[in-house]
Amino acid sequence: MAIVGANDEFRFVNAAWETLFGYREAELVGHQITSLIGDGPLVNGIPFALPSNGRVQRDRAEMIGRTKDGSWLPIDVSAMRHETPVGSVRVVIVRDMTERWQDEDVSQSAHELDRKRIADEIHDGSIQSITAASLRLQQLRRGASDPADLQILTTIEDLLEMTSVGLRELMVKLHAPGLDGLGLATAIRELLDVLRADHGVSTEVHNRLRHQPPFQRRVTLFRVAEDALRAACTARPSQVVVEMDDHNHGFLLGLQHDGIVDVGREFASLADRTRIAVRARLAGGWARFDRRVGRHARASIWIPSDGAAVQGSAA
């Protein structure tokens, strides 16, 4: 627990707060609380400005905190305003959400393995059967001479090809093969190939990652990017650009498009932006959406490189 004044400066922190953030009370009193929490825009923020009048105000938000050693910390922050003889103060309570977010990360990885299993079954079963049928049709074509028979064979071959393409696109939607070994950039390019075929959009990928994210992070980044890119395509853009960078002990995705249908100056609809931000938040990161400047609307999504380093409960 901490008490902050109208200028957002600490007046008091208890022992649990000291343990959670790694600071002694004497190091914090007089400093602003925003130096510890509020780093990274999530779905909502917490207003620390204290009004001079009005009813008792309660605020709550899931945010990112910073410990003394520079580690990030997923936290649930709640604050309640109180009037005192010397002015307004807020009592701020912070709960560590590390374990919950790690559990959700593990759950998502298990779900991804199920998707991979289904994709592998499609490849090893249906697609292999279609390939065998196509080879058999080629053999039949060599012995056919009647134009009507040849036309029937051509029609069947076209249907098999369409089915094969559809199943391969479904495999990418279920589990992009690049996630397993070729890397995040390859997986996103595979996804963009599908979107290009579905929406006729031109695409660019700029990969500046020095190292591949670990599997769980790679899956999370891909799924958040997939949500954002599919949302962007509803605006009927002519171009979509994806950038990947190392940033602040994590991975930063930058996405931009030039579509305007239904979303105006926004990157995507409010429902889509909220869903993308929630996905990022569950991974301990954040999503920021910038309104259109010039021709392009932009989204920035940051995911930490691994789990939070600090464990705790409440402060």
Image: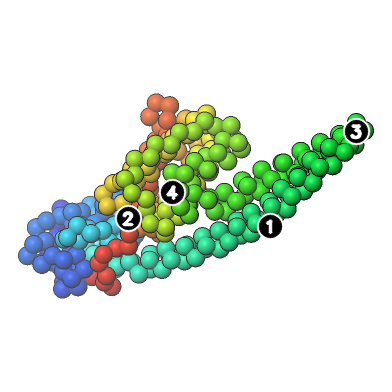
User: Where in the figure is residue 26, as x and y percent of width and height?
Assistant: 7, 65
User: Residue flagged by tag 3: what amino acid is it?
Assistant: Ser
Q: Are marks 4 and 1 in contact (CB under 8 Å)?
A: no
188 lies left or right of 246: right
Kindly state the secondary structure of the residue where label 1 is placed. helix
Instruction: Residue under label 3, please give it.
Output: 145
Task: Give the camera-side residue of 305 and 161.
Answer: 161
User: Residue flagged by tag 4: what amino acid is it?
Assistant: Gly
User: Residue flagged by tag 1: what amino acid is it?
Assistant: Gly
Q: Earlier in the sequence, mark 1 or mark 2?
A: 1
The residue under the point 65% across, 57% down is 124
Per the model, the C-alpha gap separating discs 2 and 4 is 15 Å
Instruction: Residue under label 1, please give it.
Output: 125
Q: Earlier in the sequence, mark 1 or mark 3?
A: 1
Height in image: 221 above or below 17? above
Q: How many other residues sit within 10 Å of disc 1, few (<14), some (14-19) or many (≥20)?
A: few
Height in image: 1 above or below 195? below
Instruction: Residue under label 4, please give it.
Output: 183
Q: Earlier in the sequence, mark 4 or mark 3?
A: 3
Per the model, the C-alpha gap separating discs 1 and 3 is 32 Å
Q: Earlier in the sequence, mark 4 or mark 1?
A: 1
Q: Earlier in the sequence, mark 2 or mark 4?
A: 4
Give the mark toward the camera: 1 or 3: 3
Q: Which mark is residue 305?
A: 2
User: Residue flagged by tag 2: what amino acid is it?
Assistant: Ser
Per the model, the C-alpha gap separating discs 4 and 1 is 25 Å
Give the mark toward the camera: 1 or 2: 1
Q: Residue furthest left?
A: 26
Q: Earlier in the sequence, mark 2 or mark 3?
A: 3
Q: Are marks 2 and 3 in contact (CB under 8 Å)?
A: no
Q: How many other residues sit within 10 Å of disc 2, few (<14), some (14-19) or many (≥20)?
A: many
User: Where in the figure is residue 272, as x and y percent of width and height?
Assistant: 49, 47
